[in-house]
């Protein structure tokens, strides 16, 4: 089915996700599958927590960080990087302690925080920033080397969001939410951006593109804030292949929790919702699961 007024081709296969944890997150985000422990690590940005959801028992372990955490990334089995309002911290799960690592070259003011971030195929940390009041152009998308060097890849972003890499690790995908696009770029060995282009154009009635992931076949899966869905795309054809109905409005991110990319965990939020909306969508802020048939 074509979407009028859009350059993309769309094949809508409608399927549904199911709730697996009613976490009532204010701003659930950044899901990462921890294979060794079979847990889903995720953050609640506004509640300032780091969470670990056991994917067998669906029991959740919560750690209060005390400042907004835009993302968590894995250093090792018990140590994690946290992107916050002050910069990058290292969190030790065994001791529940955190230590400050470094901040960007331009020190954050109180209204800037990290948003989405992930470890790239090269071992570096890729992360973007944003203004708490969503000021246009106030953010930057960085590559952060293991020695703490910050390399600005894209400046003047607004809501640095979805991140992912192609299966061959050569292409970096990036979303700046208000643009309703997925950008692809390649990096040279000296961190020069090559072949930057738009590969997915998202219809505005889908909801704003938020977090994303990439499956083993190279398809891009995008969470839609305000759209109650996750969409699957072929980035080579700018083609929407599938729509996953989540059942709550604010869908924030997603990640696969198996090697075959058959199980997709989805985070959501109840941030900014009215009492009427919360009554209508009481599972907002929960974690959902979509299993490919």
Image (cartoon, rainbow, N blue to C red):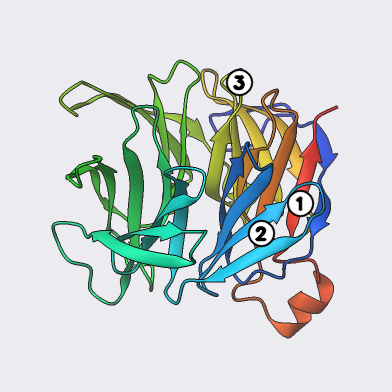
Mark 2 crowd level (few <14, some 14–19, many ≥20, 10 Å Cα): many
Which of the marked residues, 3 or 2, is nearer the chain's N terminus?
A: 3
Mark 3 crowd level (few <14, some 14–19, many ≥20, 10 Å Cα): few
Which of the marked residues, 1 or 2, is nearer the chain's N terminus?
A: 2
Closer to us: 66 or 142: 66
Q: Are marks 1 and 2 in contact (CB under 8 Å)?
A: yes
Residue where numbered disc 2 is placed: 268
- Alpha carbon distance from label 3 to label 1: 21 Å
Residue where numbered disc 3 is placed: 216
Q: Is residue 207 left or right of residue 132?
A: right
Whether 183 is drawn above or below 66: the answer is above
* Residue at 47% from the left image edge and 71% from the top image edge: 65
* Residue at 59% from the left image edge and 24% from the top image edge: 219
Horizontal and vertical percent for residue 195? 28, 21
Q: Are marks 3 and 1 in contact (CB under 8 Å)?
A: no
- Alpha carbon distance from label 3 to label 2: 24 Å
- Residue 288's tag is 1
- Alpha carbon distance from label 1 to label 2: 8 Å
- Toward which corner of the image does residue 51 lie, by quadrant? bottom right
Horizontal and vertical percent for residue 53? 69, 55
Horizontal and vertical percent for residue 27? 58, 67
Whether 274 is drawn above or below 165: the answer is below
Is disc 2 placed on a helix, strand or loop? Answer: strand
Mark 1 crowd level (few <14, some 14–19, many ≥20, 10 Å Cα): many
């Amino acid at each position: 089915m074509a979407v009028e007024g859009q350059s993309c081709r769309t094949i809508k296969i409608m399927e549904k996700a199911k709730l697996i944890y009613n976490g009532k997150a204010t701003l659930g985000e950044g899901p990462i599958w921890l294979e060794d422990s079979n847990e889903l690590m995720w953050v609640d940005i506004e509640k300032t927590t780091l969470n670990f959801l056991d994917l067998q028992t669906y029991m959740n372990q919560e750690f209060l960080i005390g400042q907004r955490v835009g993302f968590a990334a894995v250093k090792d089995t018990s140590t994690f990087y946290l992107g916050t309002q002050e910069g990058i911290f290292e969190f030790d799960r065994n001791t529940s302690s955190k230590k400050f690592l470094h901040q960007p070259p331009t020190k954050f003011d109180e209204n800037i925080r990290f948003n989405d971030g992930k470890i790239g195929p090269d071992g570096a940390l890729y992360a973007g920033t944003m203004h708490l009041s969503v000021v246009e152009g106030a953010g930057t998308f960085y590559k952060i080397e293991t020695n703490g060097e910050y390399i600005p890849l894209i400046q003047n972003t607004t809501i640095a969001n979805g991140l992912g890499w192609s299966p061959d690790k050569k292409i970096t995908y990036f979303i700046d939410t208000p643009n309703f696009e997925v950008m692809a770029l390649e990096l040279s060995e000296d961190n020069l951006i090559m072949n930057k282009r738009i590969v997915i154009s998202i219809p505005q009635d889908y909801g704003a593109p938020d977090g994303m992931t990439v499956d083993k076949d190279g398809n891009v899966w995008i969470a839609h804030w305000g759209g109650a869905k996750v969409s699957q795309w072929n980035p080579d054809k700018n083609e929407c292949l599938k729509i996953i109905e989540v059942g709550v409005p604010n869908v924030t991110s997603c990640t696969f929790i198996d090697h075959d990319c058959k199980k997709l965990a989805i985070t959501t939020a109840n941030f900014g919702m009215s009492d009427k909306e919360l009554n209508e969508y009481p599972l907002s802020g929960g974690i959902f699961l979509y299993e490919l048939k």
